[in-house]
Amino acid sequence: MRILITASLHKSGLEILHHHGTIIYEDWRSTNRVYWGEELLKKLKKEKADAVIVEADAVTDEVFEGSSLKFVGCARNSPKEIDIEAATANGVPVFYAPGRNNDSVADLTLLLMLAQARKLIQTDRLLKSGKVQIQSAEDFTKIFDSLKGSELGRSTIGIIGLGQIGTIVAKRLQGFETRLLFYDPYVTAKQGKQVNAEKVDLETLLQESDFVTLHVQANPETFRMIGEEQLSLMKPTAHLINTARSAILDEDALFKAIQSGKIAGAGLDVHSREPVGSDNRFLQFDNVTVTPHIGGNTIDVIYRQSMIIATDIDRFLKGETPKYLANPEVLKSS
């Protein structure tokens, strides 16, 4: 078997896959190449590949129709760019890596909260500006006072979406002894109590929280669920954190809210225009922490996705039942 791998995989995962054939490893981070549909099909034929493991590439219906793939692996939480219907129709199992970046996104969420709470960006920019010249006690106290922050322990934090990542965020916050609120129509109050979070409606959460953090999936139900009306309910001292998806948030409304001082600031890792460059409009604000969608960009995520994918494919090729299959009906039919 010849396996084309364009995803970022750790050597431990590659070693597992090596036992099942020849590996053609071309990490997209090294090649700077992402294949789409017909381009991927041409690449598969050129390499005479029997299987493929992708991360950013699109495996479309034409790929399944024009090849004889034994399986497809997708090193992501969900096989977003894989045509599952076409894969199933052609009897091709699709593996994926759920939960690969839950911890890393949760960590970044707390980092953004702390950066906002302690005015980290404002402090860094002020010191780098060259404008801080301490000549007297008055100069010192003026600067010192302007950088006065807050503590998470004395804050109320509202979590919108108490799924896997939202739950991890709640657990991380236990150590800060914060008051936790959550809004999630699909999670019970009893489930919330397991992480010391009180279930409330969305309006109450927005009105009472010092930090509002978004952890819902992007779908028609959640599209721009946080807009001008919702932002107007927040305290003028509150911060909004988004490490989920940009579609959940009306960015224009957020921009106006920050510009007018209706809320204190924001921490944003996801954006309507990506990849993010130095022209991102939120960078003009010292009270906004902007990161370029790096929530899942850690060495730990690469290791985790590698082991989830490789171990599951290993199970499959040994005739055992895999755990993370996007179309398990393929196994039943075969």
Image (cartoon, helix red, strand yellow):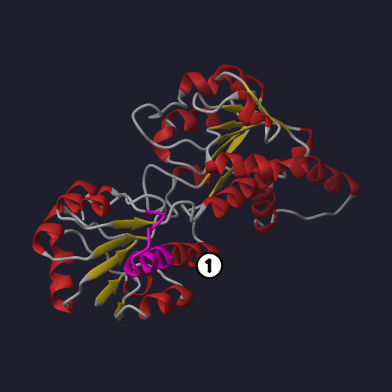
The x and y percentages for residue 116 are 66, 42
Quadrant placement of the C terminus: bottom left
In the visual, does 157 lie left or right of 249?
Answer: right
Under mark 1, the amino acid is Ile
Q: Is residue 3 above or below residue 294?
A: below
Whether residue 6 is visible = yes
Question: Label 1 neighbourhood size at 10 Å, few (<14), some (14-19), many (20+)?
Answer: few
The x and y percentages for residue 144 are 81, 45
Which residue has dot 1 on it?
299
Which stretch appears magenta? 309-324
The x and y percentages for residue 16 are 42, 76
Whether residue 267 is visible = no
320 inside magenta stretch: yes
Q: Nearer the viewer, residue 143 or 53?
A: 53
At 45% from the left and 62% from the top, the residue drawn is 308
Q: Is residue 19 above or below residue 154?
A: below
Circle 1 SS class: helix
Q: Nearer the viewer, residue 289 or 321?
A: 321
